Amino acid sequence: MADCSKGSLALLGAYLSDGSSDEEIPGPKVSSKRQASKEWPDQNPNKKISSDGNKQKLPLPSALTSMFSAPEDPMDSPAEHDGRIRSFPHERGNWATYVYIPFEPGPAVSSFVDVVLECCKTVVLLKPVDELHISLTRTVVLRHHWIKSFNESVQQCIKELPSFSLDFNTVGVYCNEEKTRTFIGLTVAAGHKSLTAAVTMLNNCLADFKLPPFYKVLRSAVQ
């Protein structure tokens, strides 16, 4: 019995001696599991990787930041438009327009304008307009992509109108719809019926674009 136990203890001692041989190697003690984790990083793409919080982010180029800056509203000065006050705010992509008949004044009309300016200067300051005209529509607002279609519609209306002549007689005083400007003009004596027909046809064009028609009371005058 003693000899058998002694042999068993010898075998056990030899096993323990072989199992502890790794720990007798000098140098840092690193397990094989930790070494494998360093050589083969985690391949999971959904795993978050922490970053150094002290690192500073690079600033965006000014060319990129300016692309997303809020557009500045244009400043409208009445002094730049002969004192005219805008009746509706400016909006990007909108264009104000109206349809009119241009009028080229002869010597008689030019002299008459000079007389009116001279007579009224002690009461009110009047300023002659650069281009005399007869309005056929009120000022309306068009979207940019409407312009081509609107021009084509107006041209089609004009083609259907016969030519006509106009005569003027008395002087009239008129105000715009916003009551911000006053005009002195020559009222139409002959040709009023033809002007009314032109305004009616143009009102139909405006209706196609859901725009307001001309004034119900037609005021035909050179202004």
Image: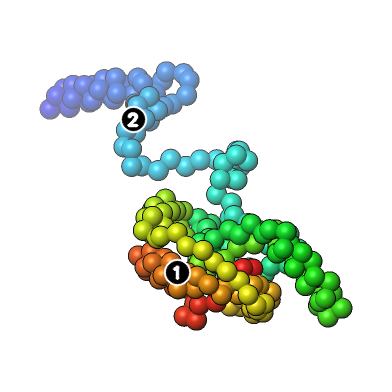
Q: Up-down: is 162 above or below 30?
A: below
Hey, which quadrant is residue 35 in on the image? Answer: top left
Mark 2–mark 1 Cα distance, whole angstroms, equals 100 Å
Q: Position of residue 91 (x, y in %)?
A: 54, 61
Q: Residue at x 64, y 72 (%)?
A: 186
| Tag of residue 33 | 2
- Residue 154 as seen in the image, left or right of residue 43: right
Instruction: Kindly give the residue lying farthest to the right in the view shown.
Output: 122
Q: Position of residue 173 (x, y in %)?
A: 67, 79
Q: Position of residue 70 (x, y in %)?
A: 58, 55
**Front residue of this view, candidates 127 and 161:** 161
Q: Quadrant of the N terminus?
A: top left
Where does label 1 land, which residue?
A: 194
Q: Amino acid at mark 2?
A: Lys
Q: Residue at x 36, y 58 (%)?
A: 160
Q: Amino acid at mark 1?
A: Ser
User: Which is closer to the viewer, label 2 or label 1?
Assistant: 1
Q: Residue at x 56, y 75 (%)?
A: 189
- Residue 32 as seen in the image, left or right of residue 101: left
